[in-house]
Image (tube, rainbow, N blue to C red):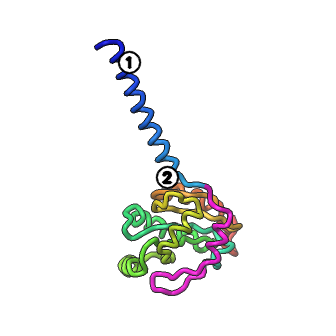
Amino acid sequence: MTGASAARRALMVLAALGGVGGGAWLAWRRLAPGEAGAEAVGLLRGLSLPDAEGQPFDLGQTAGRTLVLNFWATWCPPCVEEMPELAELHTEISGAQGMVIGIGIDSPVNIREFASKRRFPYPLLVGGTGGTELSRRFGNTSGALPFTVLIDPAGQVVLRVLGRIRLPQLRASVLPLLRKPAGKST
């Protein structure tokens, strides 16, 4: 092998590594949550979405509460896998002005069938394709699922998680935001 061909080969390897690195960086940037728009919480609280049975759920009633907002779909395995953990968290925090809400990026029929087979203690709402746009307003620029947003009682976005949540980490972020139930002191 001549010096020129070795140098050419080294340049090709460097170019390939640069391309792989650049592609990985672009993929990471595309999938990393962007900034949540300042109007996202206001938009959310102005909505009324149907629940799994088709009854309207006024999201304005979440004002003043710690809210774990989870965007999910019936066809998304990690979404379905994390739902029992979200149910556990909802049960833990519901007495302290906290709640979990699931917004399904799916059809009303699929969400109704899913909810009839699996019971969860938190509201499962139908967001449809409009739910994707709402998740984008909260910084989910890729539109990937699951996507979870933690909103404090003052309406500030505290945490955004793209991908499957881990209950211990989510719990550690949620618990300090809760109000103590009346009559309880520590």
The quarter of the displayed image where residue 117 is located: bottom left
| Residue contact between numbered discs 1 and 2, judged by CB atoms under 8 Å | no
Q: Residue at x 37, y 63 (%)?
A: 77
Check disc 2 and report its element: helix, strand or loop.
Answer: helix
Which sits in the foreground, 168 or 39?
Answer: 39
In the image shown, does 106 or 93 lie closer to the viewer? 106
Q: Nearer the viewer, residue 94 or 8?
A: 8
Say which quadrant the N terminus sits in: top left
Q: Quadrant of the C terminus?
A: bottom right
Q: Which residue is mark 2?
A: 31
The amino acid beneath tag 1 is Ala
Q: Is residue 147 magenta?
A: no
Q: Where is 165 relative to 122, above or below?
A: above
Nearer-the-camera pick, 112 or 90: 112
The answer to whether 139 appears left or right of 121 in the picture is right
| Lower position in the chain sequence, tag 1 or tag 2 | 1
- Residue plotted at (57% across, 72% down): 99
Mark 1 or 2: in front is: 1
How far across and how far down the image is residue 129, in percent? Answer: 48, 72
Residue 7: mark: 1
Tell me the quarter of the picture where residue 134 sits.
bottom right
Relative to residue 132, is residue 177 drawn left or right?
right
**Which kind of residue does numbered mark 2 sit on?**
Leu
Residue range highlighted in magenta: 35-58
